[in-house]
Structure formats: structure tokens, C-alpha cells
Amino acid sequence: MYEVRDVVIDYFDRKEPDYQNSNPHTAISAGAAIQGALINGEIEGLFLDFVSVDVGIRAYGNHMHSVILRNDPMPCKAAVICKTTRDNQTSMNFHIIQGDERFAAKNDFIGEFRLDGIPPKPKGHWPVKVKFVIFMDANGVLSVSAKLKVDEDKILEQSLTKAASVEKDDLKRIMEGETKALAASANAKSRLAVLAKYESQFTAAQIQLNDSKNSAELVAM
């Protein structure tokens, strides 16, 4: 609490905030009590936590399709429509992953489930609604369900429930990988800037050389 106060003072150019009503000795216990009440559903309107990494599904072509995004407040929910990718396809496999990489294989695998009994039709015919829900829970429980309404009397449905929390070591690895990717992108931009600079200098020198050549030809004439 004392360190937070010092950071706030530094941020506002050494202007001390009004913290007289905040007791540093009880701040942590008060926060723990609020968290406990949130988990038990005794109070509403406050966020327990935020999603630490993107959560989504492996799409066709081994790409990561993010459904719930990093920093979304919990509880949260989102849905995506998936369709068959082959003619007469009668089942769909859903691979649930979490991470920030573009390619699914580079992200962390959470679980998978299968929706069977799809009536044979041309690819892309059936819209399957895949719903993601992360509950307000100490472990961030994730529920994923796939639902297909075939007709008024037939509904296909399958689901998966897993803990969506990320271990500290996994989160550190993910963040380090993202930092390296950003650094590589920055290096690429730097190389492009240098290349553009030299190309500009070369063009200017070429123009100057042509002007000098034209001037020499006029003198000779």
C-alpha cells in the first residue's frame, strides 16, 4: 500500500492524493474480503479478474481464431459461427486453445470435443454456434458448447468445461514470446527504414549525376 501511494505521487508530479480514508494496514484484508464476496455472489458490479490471454478455437488451416480476448473482464461470454468444411460432413471436432500466437499449434491446448450426427449436406450448409463462457470463479472456469439446430424437433449439442487459468510459468513464456515477436517486428521496421534512407540517397545522387551530365553536354555544345 505504501509503495502504491509513492507510485501515485510520482505519477501526478509529486502531488499527494487524498488517502486519509485508506488504511494501509487493512487494505489487503479488505481486498480479500471483496474478492471472497464476489466469488460467493454476495456482491455485484465489480470485476474479479481479467482474461490473461486470448481463448479461442483452432480454425481451418491451423489458424487461431480468438473468441474471448485478453483483458476481457470476467465473467465474459462470446460466440462464433462455425460451418462444415467438406461435403457430406457428419461430425465436427473442436480444439480449444489459449494464447496470442497466430498459428494454433504454437498456443496452449485446453481441450477438445466432437459434435456428431450432422446430416450430410454440401460444405458450409450448417451453421454451428460455438459459445464460450468464462465464469466468475477463482480458477476462471471455461465452458464451451457447440449447438446446431437441425429442425424444430432436432437439436445437436456438445460441450466442454475446463479451467481457463494460465499457470505463472506459462504466462511468463507467452509474454516472453510476444516480446520477442515485437522486437523482431521492430528490427524489421528498422531495417526497412535504413533501406529506404539509402534508396532515397541513391536516387538523389542519381538525379544530381544526371544534372551534372546534362550541364557538361551543354558546355561542350
Image (tube, rainbow, N blue to C red):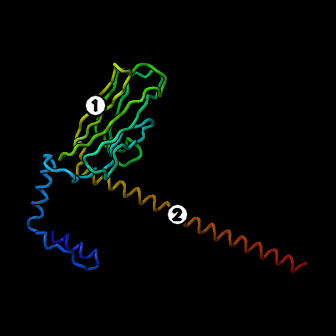
Q: Which residue is labeled 1 in the image?
A: 159
Is residue 48 found left or right of 68 in the rendered image?
A: left
Quarter occupied by the C terminus? bottom right
The answer to whether 220 is drawn above or below residue 193 in the figure is below
Mark 1, residues whose alpha carbon is within 10 Å: few (<14), some, or many (≥20)?
some
Residue with the most extreme right position:
221
Give residue 215's quadrant in the image: bottom right
- Check residue 81 in the rendering and tell me which mark sits there, or answer none: none
Q: Residue type at mark 2?
A: Arg
Dot 2 alpha-carbon crowd within 10 angstroms: few under 14, some 14 to 19, many 20 or more: few
**Residue at point 16% right, 72% down?**
19
Residue 14, image x and y in percent?
25, 80
Residue 71 location (% of width, % of height)? 31, 53
Q: CA distance from mark 1 to mark 2?
A: 48 Å
| Left or right: residue 98 compared with residue 191 | left
Location of the N terminus (image quadrant): bottom left
Residue 51, image x and y in percent?
Answer: 28, 50
Kind of residue sitting beneath label 1:
Ser
Report the residue at 12% width, 51% height from top: 37
The residue labelled by disc 2 is: 191
